Image: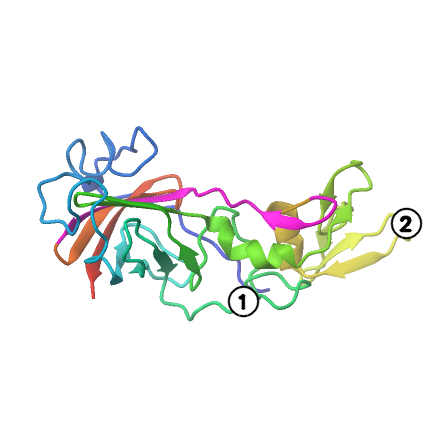
Amino acid sequence: MRHLFLVACCSFLAACGGASSTDGDPGGTGGIGGQGGIGGTGGSGAGSGDGGTTSLLVGVWKGYVTNFTLADGTDTVTLTIDDSGPVPGGHVVFGDAASLPAPTNPDIGYPPGVESVASNAVVTGFAYTVLQGSLVSDRLKFKLTPGEVWTQWCEMQAPIADETNPGSYSCVHNWGYGSDGTKCYQDNPNTGQKVFIDCGKLHLCQNVCQCSATKCSTNLTPSVAFDLQLQGSKATGGVLGLDDSEHKVDLTHL
């Protein structure tokens, strides 16, 4: 049976202080580095004053997330800053897997071959857009939206009215489901027949895509937050939202 896509939830290093930020952003009081840690003003940062400048940030920053294992078995994270304006812009790729191709088949789950993935998990090989970027002195903050990876796939789906709950819609029938050990299926209550369906599509339609009468989409709320301190060619700090813990991040400007 095709592999189950899992993102491991690991405990983080004792050096992280064993506590989460109190304000929802990495590096807050009691978080990684404690008060005056991440985002402090003592380093030789790339920014300059409130708002800073991103000119020295442009390029590729590559490193790792501690105590966190991605689906490809790595802990790699690559941040590319490609906007030299006042607000940092770019993208983040997790893992060392090949770039993920765009979805083409609405009847096959995405990524192909992945049967199940948490709606808030990050997918290796996908370029997540840097959102809400800010640079103040030497402190770089930004967020990502895990659901971005399924935007195109969900938009390819045709809404199906829920026969049990009028006014509700999905991209699969609300018929329940089962598996014969190799394939997933739904039982058609009108005919009594099993309707076989790709397991990946079944999972995404039930757990990731959100449909109305006219279209399907996905949750685009930013929920992964990075908080980094810049010191020359190094960026260190923390990330929240990959799982239930706060993780340390260490990046180097290539």
Provide the residue designation for mark 1. 102
Q: Is residue 216 above or below residue 1?
A: above
Which residue is painted at 77% across and 53% down in the image?
A: 186
Q: Is residue 198 left or right of residue 250?
A: right
Which residue is painted at 39% across and 39% down in the image?
A: 244
Provide the residue designation for mark 2. 190
Q: Quadrant of the N terminus?
A: bottom right
Q: Check if residue 168 falls in the magenta segment.
A: no
Task: Answer few, some or many: residues within 10 Å of disc 1's Cα (few below 14, many 20 plus, some between 14 and 19).
Answer: few
Q: Which residues are magenta?
A: 212-231
Identify the coloring: rainbow
Measure the alpha-carbon separation of dots 1 and 2.
36 Å
Type of amino acid at the residue the image marks with label 2: Asn
Q: Check if residue 216 falls in the magenta segment.
A: yes
- Secondary structure at numbered mark 2: loop
Q: Is residue 221 above or below residue 231?
A: above
From the top left corner, tell me how far across and down residue 103 is, in percent: 58, 65
Residue at the outermost front position: 85
From the top left corner, tell me how far across and down residue 201 is, in percent: 65, 57
Between residues 7 and 170, which one lies in front from this camera angle?
Answer: 170
Asked whether the beta carbons under mark 1 and mark 2 sit within 8 Å of each other, the answer is no
Between residues 78 and 135, which one lies in front from this camera angle?
Answer: 135
What's the mark number on residue 180? none
